[in-house]
């Protein structure tokens, strides 16, 4: 059955004009997010995950950033909208949570003021109604004594509570799409688990679609249904989570999965240790010719050094690699 698409990205290319040259952080990617689903985006630092999310909401200063392509939300191209139109969408139909809550919480306003301001701005309700809803949101994200916490400044809250407050703010206008950029990375493990449970529960209640950006494959396994793997600004593999974990097709994905421990994992005979991907992610200013992963790839062939691999469709999956051509 064909699923209903909420956001479609076509040939997105985001580059930064710098004194050293043009850095292409996202290089012609395409992806689709369906209504109500969680799509995971995974890859090492600098692979273009966060720039993709920031491009969707047009949160990159232009110049130096330049965004090309199409980002269709409900059929309308976000890249063609005026700043006024895009501001109405931010924090309303689409909102974002960041790794570090202080990035989006204002240190000089109380938590309640910030959440109620967002509600007032987008829903046109009175101050009292917005404040009551802000307190309700804090309760929903399980912040104890929400009436008291609402009157406190962000620095008075613990890291976990700040993250919850940011989630409350992001969800206060019941967005149809939530961009979650490393939402649990800065937190300790028990708080991480609570935040994951919370996001899952809220997703069910509010029916929000989620774009989950992380380098944490465990989080992807827990929350996402489909996943795209990015490397140097390109999508190198896309699959259902269970298929990707059962049989990663791209050597980079194989490397990522080989480098993490997980429960119940069977080591191949004679293999005692986790494997790491050799080498480093190349600089955006010095991309290798041919396949960008070839200097680090254990399965590199002659053609990989010379020609860019094609995006191959295989059993409903996509993989950017000569091995599958
Ligand atoms: Fe490795 Fe070649 Fe595939 Fe690139 S195209 S991932 S170098 S096998």
Image (cartoon, grey):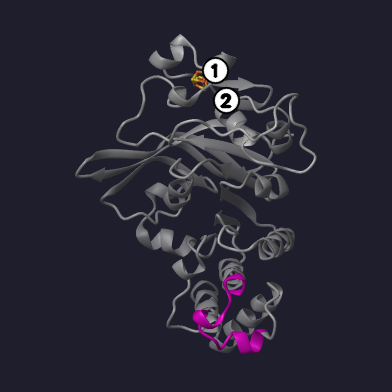
Residue nearer the viewer, 220 or 138: 220
Circles 2 and 1: CB atoms closer than 8 Å? yes
295 relative position to 311: left or right: left
Classify residue 97 by image quadrant: bottom right
Regarding residue 34, the answer to whether it shows in the image is no
In the image, which residues are magenta?
A: 146-161
Residue 158: within the magenta? yes
Dot 2 or dot 1, earlier in sequence: 2
Q: Is mark 1 within 8 Å of ligand 1?
A: yes
Image coordinates of residue 134 in percent, x first then y, are 61, 80
48 relative position to 183: left or right: left
Q: Is mark 2 within 8 Å of ligand 1?
A: yes
Q: Quadrant of the N terminus?
A: top right
Q: Quadrant of the C terminus?
A: top right
Q: Which residue lies under the disc numbered 2?
A: 251
**Picture mark count:** 2
Residue nearer the viewer, 120 or 142: 142
- The numbered dot on residue 299 is 1
Image coordinates of residue 10 in percent, x first then y, are 47, 36
119 relative position to 293: left or right: right
Regarding residue 245, the answer to whether it shows in the image is yes
């Amino acid at each position: 059955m064909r699923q209903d698409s909420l956001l479609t990205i076509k040939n997105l290319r985001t580059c930064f004009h710098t004194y050293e040259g043009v850095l292409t952080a996202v290089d012609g990617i395409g992806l689709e997010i369906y209504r109500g689903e969680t799509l995971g985006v995974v890859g090492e630092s600098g692979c273009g995950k966060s720039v993709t999310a920031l491009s969707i909401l047009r949160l990159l200063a232009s110049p130096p950033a330049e965004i090309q392509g199409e980002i269709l939300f409900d059929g309308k191209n976000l890249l063609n909208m005026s700043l006024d139109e895009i501001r109405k969408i931010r924090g309303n139909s689409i909102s974002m949570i960041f790794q570090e809550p202080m990035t989006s919480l204002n240190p000089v306003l109380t938590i309640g003021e910030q959440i109620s301001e967002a509600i007032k701005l987008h829903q046109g309700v009175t101050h009292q109604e917005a404040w009551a809803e802000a307190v309700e949101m804090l309760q929903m994200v399980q912040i104890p004594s929400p009436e008291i916490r609402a009157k406190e400044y962000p620095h008075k809250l613990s890291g976990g509570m700040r993250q919850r407050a940011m989630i409350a703010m992001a969800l206060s206008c019941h967005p149809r799409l939530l961009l979650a950029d490393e939402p649990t990375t800065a937190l300790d493990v028990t708080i991480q688990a609570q935040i994951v449970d919370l996001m899952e529960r809220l997703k069910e209640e509010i029916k929000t679609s989620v774009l989950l950006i992380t380098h944490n494959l465990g989080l992807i396994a827990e929350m996402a249904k489909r996943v795209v793997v990015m490397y140097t600004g390109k999508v190198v593999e896309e699959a259902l989570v269970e298929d990707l974990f059962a049989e990663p097709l791209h050597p980079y994905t194989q490397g990522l999965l080989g480098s993490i421990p997980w429960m119940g994992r069977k080591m191949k005979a004679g293999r005692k240790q986790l494997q790491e991907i050799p080498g480093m992610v190349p600089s955006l200013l010095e991309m290798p010719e041919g396949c960008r992963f070839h200097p680090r790839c254990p399965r590199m062939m002659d053609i990989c050094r010379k020609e860019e691999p094609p995006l191959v469709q295989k059993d409903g999956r996509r993989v950017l690699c000569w091995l599958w051509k």
